[in-house]
Amino acid sequence: MLDRLKDEPKTTGMLCDAFPDIDRCTVMLHLKVLEEAELIVARRDGRERWNHLNALPIKQIHDRWISQYAGHALSIIDQLKSDLEA
């Protein structure tokens, strides 16, 4: 669902349509979990509920964890390149 929200907000109905194999209650439960994890923000506009991606926690995970591993992987590749050129 996060991938569906990365380009633009979607209503709950749009997300239900995007996942035809999942019933509406399950979609809504998943959205509740994502909202509690602060990965999405939901706003009401009349009868519609618009779901927006909150990219900040994802960026924080990347900055804290993934970038460390990427730096280590790049140093290994750099060492391999140096060894092959020697």
Image: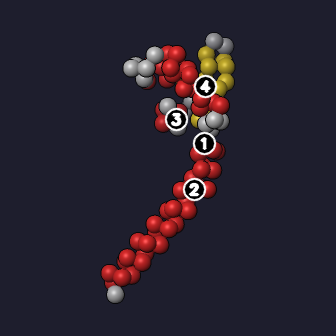
Q: Answer with mark 2 or mark 3, whichever residue precedes in sequence.
A: 3
Q: Amino acid at mark 1?
A: Ala
Helix, strand or loop under label 3: helix
Q: Answer with mark 4 or mark 3, whichever residue precedes in sequence.
A: 3
Q: Amino acid at mark 4?
A: Lys
Which numbered disc, 1 or 4, marks the residue closer to the eye?
4
Helix, strand or loop under label 4: helix
Q: Which mark is residue 32?
A: 4
How packed mark 4 is, by other alpha carbons closer than 10 Å (few <14, some 14-19, many 20 or more), is some
Q: Amino acid at mark 3?
A: Leu
- 9, above or below 60, in the image: above
Residue at image location 55% in from the left, 60% down from the top: 67
- 1, above or below 28, in the image: below
Question: Which residue is identified by label 3?
Answer: 2
How far apart are the two marked residues, 2 and 3, measured between alpha carbons? 19 Å
How far apart are the two marked residues, 4 and 2, measured between alpha carbons? 25 Å
Residue at image location 51% in from the left, 62% down from the top: 69
Question: Which residue is identified by label 2?
Answer: 65
Q: Answer with mark 3 or mark 1, whichever residue precedes in sequence.
A: 3
